[in-house]
Amino acid sequence: MADFSTDVRYIKGIGEQRAKVLQKLGIANLRDLISYFPRTYEDRRAYKRIADLVAGESACVRAVVADEPRLSHVRKGLDLVKLRVVDESAALDLTYFNQAYLKNTFHTGEEYVFYGRAEGTLLRKQMTNPLFERAGENRVTGRIVPIYPLTAGVSQTLLSHAVRQGLDACADDLTDFLPEDVRQAHRLCHVRYAYENVHFPADEEALAVARRRLVFEELFLLTLGLRLLRERRAAVAGQRCENTDLAPFYAALPFALTRAQKRAIEDCARDMASGRPMNRLVQGDVGSGKTMVAAAAVWFAAQSGLQSALMAPTEILAEQHYHTLAPLLEGLGVRCALLTAATKAKARREVLEQLQSGALTLAIGTHALLSPDVQYQKLGLVVTDEQHRFGVDQRASLGAKGDDPHLLVMSATPIPRTLALMIYGDLDVSLIDELPPGRQKIDTFAVNSSYHARIYAFLRKLVAEGRQAYVVCPMVTENDTSDVRFADERKAVTAYAETLQKEVFPDLRVAPIHGKMKPKEKDAVMRAFSEGDVDILVSTTVIEVGVDVPNAAVMLIENAECFGLSQLHQLRGRVGRGAHKSYCVLISDNAGEENRQRLAVMTRTNDGFAIAEEDLKLRGPGDFFGSRQHGLPSLRVADLSCDMALMHDSRAAAERLLAADGALAAHGALRSRVAELFELGAGAMN
C-alpha cells in the first residue's frame, strides 16, 4: 500500500538532489507530486512538411540530416551548433545554443523528428533549439505532451519523469474519494484513469474525460469543506455585543456615508450581536470607504466593553489608518494606539500595559500585533486590511489572543460574485458597490511605445503643476520568458529609474521601489513619495497595496499586457485619490486582438466589479487564486471561467450528500480528505 506522505526523495528515480529542486514547486511528498497537474499540453502527434511550416507556430517535422553539423565559438560563453535537415519538400536550418556535444550527436543521412517553433522566411525556414529524437523513438514526440509550471533548476523532462515514477509507485493504491453513486450519477471516470490521463493522455478524449473527473472532485471537496467550516462556526459561541443604536456614530462623522457603507455596517452589527463569531469580508473598490465600516465595527464593539485590533500589511499603511481613525474614534471615547516595529521601547511598554489593563480600546499595527508579549484584556474584534497579504496562520495568531473574537476582513480586490462564492464560501460577504460622492473618474488611455515622448512631456507638465506620478514595470517570474528585459524585477525597476533620471528627467526627483528591498527601505521610499520629496516613483506591483498619496495624478504602466485586468485596476486606483484630475496610461506593443480587447475594457469603465467579470471571462481565475493567501485549498485543475456548469453540478451533489450525512460519518475517507485539505484554513476561521 503506497504511503502518500512519503518524501519524494524516496521515490525510485528521484533521490536527494531532484527532491531539493522539486521542493521549490511545493512538491514535498508523493501526493504533491501526482497532484502537480500540467498547465497546458502540446500536441506533438501531427507532422508537417518543412515547406508547410508557418512562422511562429510550433510543429513536428520528420527530416534527414543533410550535412555535417558545424560548431562555432562566437564568444566566451556562447557556442553555436548549426546544421541543415531536409525532407521531400524543403530544407530547414537548425541552430542550437551552448550544446556543443550535439556536433557529434547528429549523423549525416540519419532521420530524426524535430519539434520546435518555426522561424525564418517563406524561402528559408529555421528553428532554434528544437527538441529532437531518432525517428520512431516517440519519447518526446508522437504524443500529447504535458507542460508543467516550472522554476529554476526544474526542467519539463525532470518533472515528467518524476511524475511517471510517482504514478507507477501508487497508481494501484489511489483512493476514490467520490462516493460511487455520485461518480456514476455524473458519469465520471475512475480515479486511476483520471490521474494517468491528465498527466499522460492517450488522446484528446481521454484528457477531457480525466480532466472533467478531477475538476468535479476538486469543486466537490471545496464545497464540502466550506459547508463544514460554516457549520463549525455556527456551533462556536462568540462574544455577544449589545444591540446598540448606530445613530451616535453616524452623527459624529463629518460626512454622510453611502447606502452601501451603511448596509455593510449593519451587516457587521447584526453578526456581532448574534452570539456567534462574525466572519465577514467587506469587499469594495479602491476608495469605496471600507475603513469607515471598520471604524463603525470598532465603535460598536467598544460599546460592549470589547477591544479591537486592526492589522495592516505595512508600517506606513498602519500609520495611515491610525491618522484616519484615531481623531474620529477618540472623539467618540474610543482610545487608540499605534504599534509597529518602529514604536520606541518606552512607548511600546506603555501601549502593552494599557492593552492588558483595558485602558486602550483599539490597537492599530502591523505584524507587531502578533508578538507574544502583546496581550489584551478583552479582545473582541480583529480587523485585517487587504486580506490576501496575510497568511491564515497570522490571522489565527491574532484571533488566538481573544476568546473567539469577531473577524472583519477588508479587501479592495473586486471579485466576480461567482468566484467570491468559491473563494470566500466560508465568509459572509458585504459588497460596497458605490463610491462616495467626489471620487472622480480616472481617464485611461491604451497606447503603444511610440507615444513615450508625448507621455513623458505630459508627465513633465503635470509635475511642473505640482503633481506626482507612478511608473510601473511588470514583474516577471523565473520561468516566464515573455520579455527578458524584465527577468529580474530589481534590475528592471532600477535600470528604468536610472534611464528616466539621466536621459528624460534629469531635473526631477526619480526613485525606484521593488519587492526585493528590505521593508524599512520600501517604507522610506513610500514615505518620501507621500511627503512630496519624490516626483516620479518607478515601481513593480509592490505599490498595488499602498498608501494614499492624494497628490499623485498619473499612473503609467509599461508592458500592460503582462498584468491581469483586476491588477491593472488596482494599480490605477493608486491615483485619483485627491482633488486633482488624474490619468492612467497603459503602454503595450502587443497588437493581438485579445490584448486590444482587454485594454479597451480599462479605457471604458472604472467599475472594478465589471472589470473583474471581464477578467474572469478573458483570463480565467488565475488572478484571483494563486498567491492570494485566502486560507482555502487553491484550485489545481478547475478553471471557473469555463467550468461553471461543473461547479454547479458538484455543489449540488455536495449539498445532497451533506443533507443525507451531515457529518460525513458514513464516508470516512472523504471526510479525512476534506479535513486534510482544510487543515490550515480551519484554525483561522473559528
Image (spheres, helix red, strand yellow):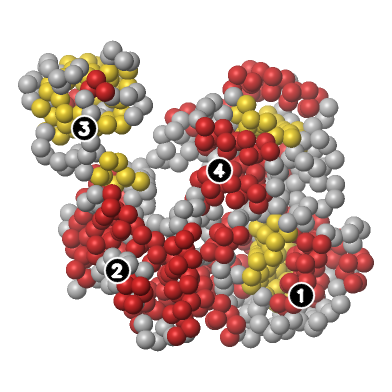
**Numbered badge on residue 371:** none
Is 557 positioned to the left or the right of 380 in the image?
Answer: left
> Residue 84: horizontal and vertical position, in percent?
18, 17
Q: On the image, numbered disc 1 is attached to which residue?
A: 269
Does 685 appear above or below 414?
A: below
Residue sitting at x 75%, y 46%: 548
Q: Earlier in the sequence, mark 4 or mark 2?
A: 2
Q: On the image, numbered disc 4 is attached to which residue?
A: 564
At label 2, which amino acid type do we have?
Ser
* Number of dots carrying numbers: 4
User: How far apart are the two marked residues, 2 and 3, measured between alpha carbons?
Assistant: 42 Å
Q: On the image, numbered disc 3 is attached to which residue?
A: 47
User: How far apart are the two marked residues, 2 and 1, measured between alpha carbons?
Assistant: 44 Å
Q: Nearer the viewer, residue 608 or 406?
A: 608
Kind of element beneath mark 4: loop
Q: Nearer the viewer, mark 4 or mark 2?
A: 4
Residue sitting at x 60%, y 36%: 599
Circles 4 and 2 in contact, beta carbons < 8 Å: no
At label 3, which amino acid type do we have?
Tyr
Q: Nearer the viewer, mark 2 or mark 3?
A: 3
User: How far apart are the two marked residues, 4 and 2, measured between alpha carbons?
Assistant: 36 Å
Residue 514: in sight, yes or no?
no
Circles 2 and 1 in contact, beta carbons < 8 Å: no
Q: On the image, numbered disc 2 is attached to which residue?
A: 5
Q: Nearer the viewer, residue 335 or 617?
A: 617
Which quadrant of the rendered structure holds the N terminus? bottom left
Q: Nearer the viewer, mark 3 or mark 1?
A: 3
Residue sitting at x 21%, y 66%: 170
Is 381 positioned to the left or the right of 96 in the image?
Answer: right
